[in-house]
């Protein structure tokens, strides 16, 4: 997923021996391919750039853009010409159903059966209650991204989660945090009826933006007067979209930079806490959780589950999780004033664990002798005491 801030984009034309495919999920961008004039791409638009063809991409200054980006080395077939650039809009693509199963649909964004292309990009549509009916085995890689789900599907998903939670925790207060595709009226109404709190991302609209115009202008003006690189503020309002049956509390995070304004909205059923607390401490906690999962996967290699046995893969995952807790415990034991107190696991491993030392073993203890020039000597000296469990 490629996220481009307002007025951001490529600093210069990109021309590499790779083919690119872009699909706009949110916002809008301007794309220039080769010497052709720039083309405006809105939500649902897509572009294919052949290998060796230059292109530029810039986000419009009004709002950030989110784009599915795929780049792949081109595998040329003998006697087959290289494909040309394609720009299209998924709404104008015909819906097909080559499977014949009722309730399913396909849109082929790249020409189906055209041998010039060495991969496919398809949209799949499912009506409520329809599922993928078979187990398939392929020799090629697959990537899946859920673009959107209807309110009925989101509501059904939340209902199933709550049903499983309630089998063990009958009276626990539940709060759902989710991206903007969860902010469907059916899902919010169901949560409110069943006493469940929620905080969902919300796409900005012109009527909603007008309600925070005064605060946004104040933040933008103060940033310019004080000549700050960035200034952030928060506000809240009551908002009722056309598809909603009632007004709901809506919180806005407003950030002014030298490039312009960036406004993000969330909608919540919570009636306590400031706008800043709702956005930064509750909603953005999702981002911190995703960062920790990223550390787990990329820096502790927890995605190496290639055993044939599911049980063996589960044991490997448990061991990776144990390593995660060890690294997290070490980081939390580092004094907050130290640079490494907020370091990623890869940095901790490099600075604290991958060190040469002389090991001297005696009958009563084991001594570790580090180099006299060890840059973290004082930290290594105090960490064992901080990690020792407290006595009774």
Image: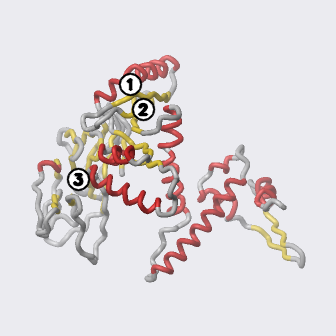
The residue positioned 67% from the left and 47% from the top of the image is 339
Instruction: Choose the circle earlier in sequence order: 3 or 1.
Output: 3
Residue 88 in view, yes or no? no
Provide residue 160's location: percent of width, then percent of height: 37, 60
* Element marked by disc 2: strand
- Which image quadrant for residue 157? bottom left
Do the numbered discs 2 and 1 sit on residues whose CB atoms are within 8 Å?
yes
Colour scheme used in the picture?
A: secondary structure
* Residue 261 left/right relative to 34: right
Residue beneath disc 1: 212
Residue 262 position in % (x across, y down): 40, 32
Q: Which mark is residue 296?
A: none
Indicate the secondary structure of the residue bearing disc 1: loop
- Tell me which numbered mark, 2 or 1, is placed earlier along the sequence: 1
Seen at 43% across and 22% down, the residue is 215
How many other residues sit within 10 Å of disc 3, few (<14), some (14-19) or many (≥20)?
many
Q: Earlier in the sequence, mark 3 or mark 2?
A: 3
Q: Which residue is mark 3?
A: 49
Per the image, label 3 sits on a secondary structure element best described as strand
Q: Residue at x 46, y 20 (%)?
A: 224
Q: Quadrant of residue 41?
A: top left
Q: Is residue 93 left or right of residue 171?
A: left
Q: Quadrant of the C terminus?
A: bottom right
> Crowding at label 2, few (<14), some or many (≥20) Cα neighbours within 10 Å?
many
User: Vertically, is 358 above or below 218?
Assistant: below
Instruction: Give how far across and how far down residue 370 sits, in percent.
Output: 79, 63
**What residue would you read off at disc 2?**
252
Distance from the alpha carbon under mark 3 to that under mark 1: 39 Å
Whether 260 is drawn above or below 20: the answer is above
């Amino acid at each position: 997923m490629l996220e481009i801030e307002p007025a951001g984009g490529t600093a210069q034309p990109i021309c590499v021996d790779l083919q690119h495919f872009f699909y706009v999920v949110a916002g809008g961008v301007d794309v220039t391919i080769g010497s052709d004039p720039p083309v405006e791409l809105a939500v649902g638009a897509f572009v294919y750039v052949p290998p060796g063809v230059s292109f530029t991409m810039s986000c419009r200054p009004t709002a950030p853009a989110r784009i599915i980006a795929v780049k792949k080395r081109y595998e040329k077939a003998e006697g087959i010409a290289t494909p040309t650039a394609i720009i299209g809009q998924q709404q104008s693509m015909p819906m097909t159903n080559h499977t014949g199963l009722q309730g399913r649909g396909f849109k082929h964004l790249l020409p189906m059966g055209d041998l010039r292309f060495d991969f496919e990009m398809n949209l799949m549509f499912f009506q409520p209650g329809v599922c993928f009916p078979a187990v398939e085995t392929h020799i090629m890689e697959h990537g899946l991204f859920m673009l959107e789900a209807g309110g009925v599907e989101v509501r059904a998903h939340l209902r199933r989660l709550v049903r499983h939670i309630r089998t063990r925790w009958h009276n626990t207060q539940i709060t759902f945090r989710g991206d903007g595709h969860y902010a469907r009226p059916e899902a919010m109404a169901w949560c409110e009826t069943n006493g469940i709190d929620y905080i969902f991302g919300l796409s900005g609209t012109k009527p909603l933006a007008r309600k925070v115009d005064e605060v946004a202008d104040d933040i933008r003006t103060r940033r310019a007067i004080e000549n700050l690189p960035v200034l952030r503020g928060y506000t809240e309002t009551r908002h009722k979209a056309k598809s909603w049956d009632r007004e709901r509390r809506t919180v806005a995070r407003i950030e002014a930079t030298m490039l312009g304004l960036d406004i993000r909205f969330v909608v919540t059923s919570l009636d306590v806490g400031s706008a800043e607390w709702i956005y930064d401490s509750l909603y953005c906690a999702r981002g911190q959780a995703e960062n920790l999962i990223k550390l787990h996967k990329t820096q502790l290699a927890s995605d190496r589950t290639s055993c044939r046995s599911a049980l063996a893969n589960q044991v490997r995952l448990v061991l990776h999780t144990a390593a995660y807790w060890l690294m997290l415990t070490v980081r939390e034991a580092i004094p907050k004033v130290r640079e490494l107190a907020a370091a990623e696991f890869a940095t901790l491993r490099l600075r604290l664990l991958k060190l040469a030392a002389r090991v001297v073993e005696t009958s009563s203890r084991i001594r570790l002798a580090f180099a006299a020039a060890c840059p973290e000597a004082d930290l290594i000296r105090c960490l064992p005491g901080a990690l020792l469990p407290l006595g009774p």
